[in-house]
Image (cartoon, grey):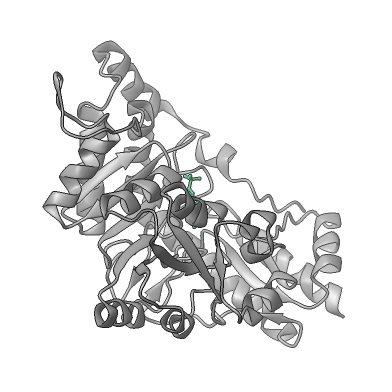
Amino acid sequence: MRVQYNYLPNEFEDVTSILAKWEKLIRSTEFTLGPFVEEFESAFSTYVGAKHCISTNNGTDALILALKSLGVGYGDEVISVSNTFYASIGAIVACGATPVLVDCDDRYQIDPLRVKSAINSKTKAILPVHWAGASPDMDQILSIADEHGLLIIEDACMGIGGSWRGQHPGTFGNVGAFSMHPLKSLNVMGDGGMVVTNDDKVASWMRMYRNHGMKNRDEIEIWGVNMRLQPLQAIVAMEQLNKLNDTVLKRGVNASMLDHELDSVSPYIKTPSRLGHNKETFSLYMCLAENRDELLAFLHEKGVEAKVHYPIPLHKQNAANNDCIIDRMMDKVEYQASRLITLPIHQFLSKEQVQYTGEVIREFYQ
Ligand SMILES: *Cc1c(COP(=O)(O)O)cnc(C)c1O
């Protein structure tokens, strides 16, 4: 049996309705921003429950736009976590600010206690990541930020469709950033991203900066850039948004099934605790495995396309030698880096494929 990691061939098997809308777009020649982009932005802000949504060309630019909109720049420290995708930290450096990398907890989420201890007079913001589609302890992060007067920029790139106490990731802080890369819970046929905020001023700054700082065709207010979402992708995003709840539901069902399949090998495989008040998107289904590399090879041999996110924590990357402050305690991130394994969990897997994944893992440890 094969258990594929890549779900894109299934997802885009039938593109009739996308093609019909693309034809409408092509005839309209509304190729920069325009009604298709606006329709998606408005639907997305309703979906997540934020006042403003500004779409961007990818998630990395969404993070850069979010940081810049709040004036994060040279001389500022931004606290984030060492087990995240490169872009969370790359975006901070791109704004001229200094990332401060801290450890995570047992759920692979940024550890609020380490955040607290990393705060000093240069700290301007916290950049929590909703890693793998689960959420960090937003209650604690909000209260720390409040106590110290810090901004919050959420990296909710993997969190579209999730919730923390019923509230959508990306809507807790000042600005939230999302990605629609093909491997995220809401994905397009290439790159796409968004920022959301409830702050009118910040929203209008982001809208301008994204589009050359233009107030209108003839006047610019600030020096901006071009971070616009392609209307072709806005159409795909709109279709995907309509399927999102179903996608997240199916992934959740598969994840529960896999959690259960792995119960009996619990000395060797540890799944993170699932909090009742945190609906996860399962952008990644990760667990900790003894003899990870041997297990990975065994799974591949048996046709299960498992992956590792990621074998080298960010504070151990060459790039972190410059421009980064690294907290002295990185025990969990380092422990997890040699044990984490990502198993296929997507919405197109059959029950048999999920059960087979469990069987192969049990066979390995017997
Ligand atoms: C995917 C991702 C990004 C970057 O998004 P792109 O759209 O690929 O630029 C940033 N942060 C996290 C946590 C991500 O998963």
The answer to whether residue 356 is above or below residue 232 is: below
Q: Is residue 215 left or right of residue 73?
A: left
Percent from the top left, x then y, of residue 194?
33, 46
Percent from the top left, x then y, of residue 22?
35, 22
The answer to whether residue 110 is above or below residue 235 is: below
Is residue 161 shown to the viewer in this render?
A: yes
The answer to whether residue 302 is above or below residue 294 is: above
Q: Report which quarter residue 310 is drawn in.
A: bottom right
Between 191 and 185, the residue placed more toward the observer is 191
Q: Is residue 239 left or right of residue 280?
A: left
Total labels: the figure holds 0
Which residue is pictured at 81% across the width and 56% down the height?
A: 300
Percent from the top left, x then y, of residue 92?
44, 54
The answer to whether residue 57 is above or below residue 197 is: above
Is residue 344 shown to the viewer in this render?
A: no
Q: Report which quarter residue 79 is drawn in.
A: bottom left
Q: Quadrant of the C terminus?
A: bottom right
Between 173 and 160, the residue placed more toward the observer is 173
Q: Is residue 50 left or right of residue 135?
A: left
Between 296 and 113, the residue placed more toward the observer is 113
Q: Is residue 111 left or right of residue 344?
A: left
Percent from the top left, x then y, of residue 176?
32, 57
